[in-house]
Amino acid sequence: MKRSEHRILTTHTGSLIRPEKLLEYIAPMQAGEAYDRAGFNECLKDSVHEIVQQQAKVGIDIVTDGEFGKSISWAQYALQRLDGFERRGFKDDTENPFTQGADRKKFPEFYEELDGKQSIATVNQSVCVGPIVYTGISEVERDIANFKTALKDAEVEEGFLPVAAPSSVIPDRRNEYYDSEEDCLDAIANAMRTEYLSIVDAGLILQLDDARAAVTFDRIVPPKSFEDYYNWLGRQVDILNQALQGIPPESIRYHVCWGSWPGPHTTDVPLKKIVDQILRVNAGAYVVEGANPRHEHEWKIWGDIDLPREKILIHGVISHATNVVEHPQLISDRICRIAELIGPERVIAGTDCGFAQGPFYRRVHPSIMWAKLLALVEGARLASRKLFG
């Protein structure tokens, strides 16, 4: 895993806005309709090649495939790679966990308006009805091959592939097969380990996306207590580390955020209350939000934390959820204040979350996405001059 030894490196959290030509194939796939499989595979290969070239042209140092191979979402994609689940419709919105949460209860009028502008992301429930087995090896191998070819052609040295951590795999799922929810989660972790190993064995960096680690607080507190949530989170970390056994930490990035939705987020759990659990994940780098106005002030806690010298903080210095393009000087300031706390060699400049949580869920206009990434690169250059001379 590269470090900012001579200048501040740049990256992002993975998911990028899909091109229209790829969406033309994904739309019938999602609808369960017939589509040209050979045409899709060729289009996917070309699209990955182009997105890697674009990232390199902008100046991003550590790139991804945009998560283009995921035809559902950053977490629900696992439905196409795991056996043991079936999809069922919800009777009404009260059954859908996606429509629940303390933030939604606090701002019901806002969320009613938001839901009217964009449909609810989760409209069907995933129910575990049989043994969970990983069956997506051909898909992950396809994604790896497409990405490695694109990296070589773009002459980019390091790339990462984002996948879901066990607690975030198929969120809001229901278990009807295993004796307990913990047994179900263990089975998911064991199955997903196949994907984790495939990525690392291919010489790529593995990024584990785990929005549910923090978001679950908003879903269960109240009526449950913080202690209930904290214990739940600790168990998720234990299970994740079990799935990562034998994988070198320097090959792993762990991404935790408070969900990508453009809402108030007034009921988010504070970073300082869970950072110890985050740092228990056996990863070499931690990707944490730092640019959104609900959490930006939390950069200060890194001065009070004994972050091991070998660990890297990929600090969010631009937001994925607003069309306002951050000024490079602001980005530089955000980088420098973190670097002064933990050392510039352990800081990589990143984004809060992905610009698209699925093929049809983008947070900004494509032109804004590229403007933000360019500002990220320019801000890192300004910071590098100050920090490295």
Image (spheres, rainbow, N blue to C red):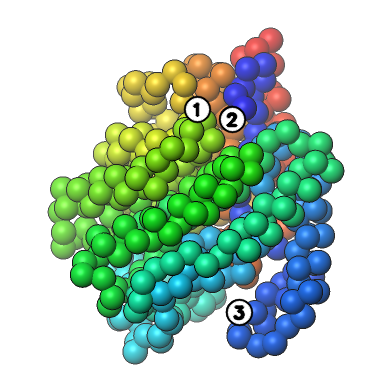
Q: Is residue 186 above or below residue 297?
A: below
Q: CA distance from mark 3 to mark 2?
A: 35 Å
Q: Earlier in the sequence, mark 3 or mark 2?
A: 2
Question: In the image, is 325 to the left or to the right of 135?
Answer: right
The residue wearing badge 2 is: 1
Q: Work out which quarter of the rendered image holds the C terminus and state it.
A: top right
Q: Residues within 10 Å of mark 1 (few under 14, many from 20)?
A: many
Check disc 1 and give the amino acid type: Ile
Disc 3 versus disc 2: nearer the observer = 2
Residue bearing the label numbered 3: 30
Drawn side of residue 106 relative to residue 347, left or right: left
Q: How far across and how far down the image is residue 384, in percent?
A: 66, 19
> As shown in the figure, which amino acid type bears the numbered disc 2?
Met
Labels 1 and 3 touching (C-beta < 8 A): no
The mark lying in front, picked from 2 and 1, is 2
**Sequence-first tag of 2 and 1:** 2
In what element is the residue under mark 2? Answer: loop
